[in-house]
Amino acid sequence: MKKKKSIEVTTQTVGRNRRNFLKVSGLAIAGSGLLLASCSDDDDNGNMLGGTFDLGTGDVGVLNYAYALEQLEAAFYTNVVNGSFYASASADEKAILLDLYNHEVNHREFFKAAIGANVPMEQQLTADLEFDFSSVDFGNRDSVLTTARILEDTGVSAYNGAGQYIQTAAYLTLAGKIVSVEARHAAAIRTIINGSADYTAFAGDDIIDDNGLDLAESPADVISKAGGFFVTPFTYKNPQA
Amino acid sequence: MNLIKFLDEFTTDKLQEPNTSRRAMFGQLGSLTKKAAIAAVPFGLATMSNKAMAQSSSSVVDVLNLALTLEYLEDEFYAMALDSGVLSGNAKAEAIYMQISKHESQHVDFLTAAIEGAGATPVAKPTFDFTVDGAFDPFNDNGAGQATAYAQLLALAQAFEDTGVRAYKGQAGNLMGNPGVLTAALQIHSVEARHASEVRRLRGLEGWITGNQRGAGMPEATQVVYDGATTEANIMQGGLDVTTLGSGSPFTVDASTQAYDEILTGDEAVAIASLFIVS
């Protein structure tokens, strides 16, 4: 039996989390310690471990994991779009960010529906994850685009790393349909960030290795990077069914 | 292994049958004969027998050889493009092609090593004809002129990259049960998607595919890249019409098709690659 990965997302140590994320991404991320709202109505379900929701294992775990990440991306782009973008946004940049908003909101609602139809109620991740974007200056181009780049690259890396935990071929295909769109996003964002300074940024040497392979990170690594955005705590202790 | 023979095998039913000697030879890769459904199974049906839903199936080595074939094609195309001089003077396009060329070459080496590591024989590199019997002149070898050649060079790159994304995606189900191989294939898949986005944007399109539109300036012959048994215009995901999941711009047909890339079956990917293969 392979050793199962254990992942704790906790907001108990906000200061440390923020420093870790800063180190990794160059972005300041804040967190706080709110309880998961949807868990209060059922103390007996299997996904509540010590009061903290666990995403689960196998198909259920990946569906909830993807839903958490899509909720994060959708919430971010909703803020970007609702804030009328940043002041200097070009027409091209606005069009791209609006497309990304549309795609991520669609992904979020897809997972909501899919989980609602296929996952037992008590194992369903809440539709109302709370996020903390206080570290993002939505009026600032660099802040918005850098955050977008991190979210898209992380999304690609997360799907690539979690594909192996999917048990049902149809779900794997669905994840594949979405991850390539995330990769298309990532390339576009990287291109508008770097412009003529680096024409190779769309698939830069900072993310593609010497075998021509993209990032693939474990849920533990993904959550440690993006965890600062999540106000609602959750765990993903055993991705492998 | 001869490519034509391989393609022939890939597109016949032979792979549906157990091949004892092959299975024994490649045993170290694990459950090679695992049959996985790649059909778009509605959620309610997801627990049904995979076998009953299968459109096609093939072994891990067959999948890797199909991938290698597509990478050979891309690798040679970008190398010839950079040698042709058609990109000279265009620093942006040249830098993009060099970066993509590097990755495709790495993919060829990686897949070759993976197949050999499994004790199998990588499919031989075919002979390609990127003019498709003279229909195109992407390298300006036949007097098309720099501007026409450049446009065709970009159009073919878009077709190859969007094909690559769809083809890898279509094979993922056949790699279940081999986590290492599956993860590597997914890692190549998303690199192809980054390439596709960039080439499309270099051509003045969006990085994502709307409906089954091949996009402005794409030759009609490339429409097959955006069609197939499941076309890029598909709005049914997991049995759900994703245009009905909410209201507003995220759920327009355009946005709903952009948000999901679709698969090509192995047969469809082979058919596209075969257009450029002489022998």
Image (cartoon, grey):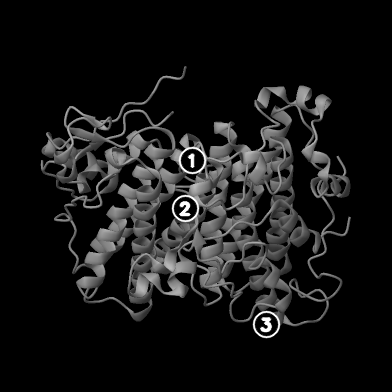
Q: Nearer the viewer, residue B115 or B107?
A: B115
Residue A121 drawn above or below residue B23: below
Q: Which residue is mark 2?
A: A179
> Where residue B140 sits in the image (x, y, percent)?
76, 75
Q: Specify whether disc 1 shares its chain with disc 3.
A: no
Secondary element under disc 3, as helix, strand or loop, is helix
Taking the image as shown, residue A146 lies to the left or right of residue B225, namely left
Question: Does residue A111 show up?
Answer: yes
* Kind of residue sitting beneath label 2: Val
Secondary element under disc 2, as helix, strand or loop, is helix
> Where residue B131 sits in the image (x, y, percent)?
81, 70
Taking the image as shown, residue A224 lies to the left or right of residue A83, namely right
Residue at the limit of the structure toward the top, as seen here: A1
The answer to which image quadrant residue B222 occupies is bottom right
Q: CA distance from mark 2 to mark 3?
A: 34 Å
Taking the image as shown, residue A148 lies to the left or right of residue B16, namely left
Q: Which residue is mark 1?
A: A163
Q: Nearer the viewer, residue A212 or A62?
A: A62
Question: Does residue A211 show up?
Answer: no
Q: CA distance from mark 1 to mark 3?
A: 42 Å
- Residue drawn at x 59%, y 44% as measured from the top left: B172
Q: Which residue is mark 3?
A: B147
Callouts 2 and 3 close, C-beta under 8 Å:
no
Callouts 1 and 2 close, C-beta under 8 Å:
yes
Secondary element under disc 1, as helix, strand or loop, is helix
* Kind of residue sitting beneath label 3: Ala
Q: Residues within 10 Å of mark 2 (few under 14, many from 20)?
A: many
Residue B24 drawn above or below residue A93: above
